Image: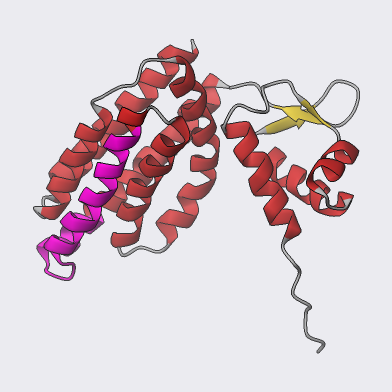
Amino acid sequence: MKQIAVQPGRAELVYQALLDEICDGSLQPGTQLVQEDLAAQLGVSRQPIQQALARLKGDGLLEEATGRGLSVSKLDLSKMRSHYEIRKSLDCLAVSLAAKRVAQKSLAAADVRKKGEIIIGRGRKAVNDDVVKTMIQHDIALHSFFYEISGNPLIANTAEIHWRFLRRVMGDVLRKAERPPSIWDQHDAILKAVVDGDSTLAEQLASDHIELACDRLSKALE
């Protein structure tokens, strides 16, 4: 059997570049994406462009454009709520498992507190600095930290596609709406419950946090 040649990963780089442009608002809803133009702008062939566009369409971030090609999808309120429903289940599971691991002494509470507080501190600074991209980056980092310490390696992979969609929604709302100062207080409370090994409280706080975020974003989009 012949060895499979390792590809340079250009499609992944193109995908990430376009994802950033969509989430940052540089590519607005309705913007048509032309393969030839993208290839010229990014300095790659059309093949990685095609692969990246197919992935973004599968993520729900692109849709068929009138005439030909693909365009950036409009923000879909019902789809956003569906993503949040799944994310709530995953986040509740992650913090509950993490808290149980702390309670069982298989996870050091001091280490969890230290690492979590570093991320929360960075998140608060991003709010003060009013940098939307960094706010979202640290928000995702904290939830990813909970996924990591849950002990279940499948949670992060399952949540990834939902974060890609919600990252765009969060960016759009944060650029237009008032910054909610309570978000990092909520994160801090969830972290404390995990550190205390209180799985029931951690799960309830995570559920409340996701529901409040979904409601806030829904109102902003409406």
Horizontal relation, residue 7 to residue 101: left or right: right
**Where's residue 158, x and y in %?**
48, 52
List x then y, in percent, for residue 30: 73, 20
Among the 4 quarters of the image, the one containing residue 214: top left
Q: Is residue 12 above or below residue 191?
A: below
Residue 59 visible in the shown view: no
The residue positioned farthest toward the front in the image shown: 129
212 and 141: which one is in front?
A: 141
Q: Does residue 175 appear left or right of residue 201 in this picture?
A: right
* Direction bottom: furthest residue: 1
Image quarter of residue 105: bottom left
Residue at 91%, 22% (x, y): give it.
67
Quadrant containing the N terminus in the rendered view? bottom right
Q: How many marks?
A: 0
Q: Which residues are magenta?
A: 97-126
Q: Is residue 63 above or below residue 100?
A: above
- Residue shown at the point (60%, 26%) measured from the top left: 25
Where is residue 166? Give x, y as percent: 49, 34
Identify the main secondary structure in magenta.
helix
Q: Is residue 100 magenta?
A: yes
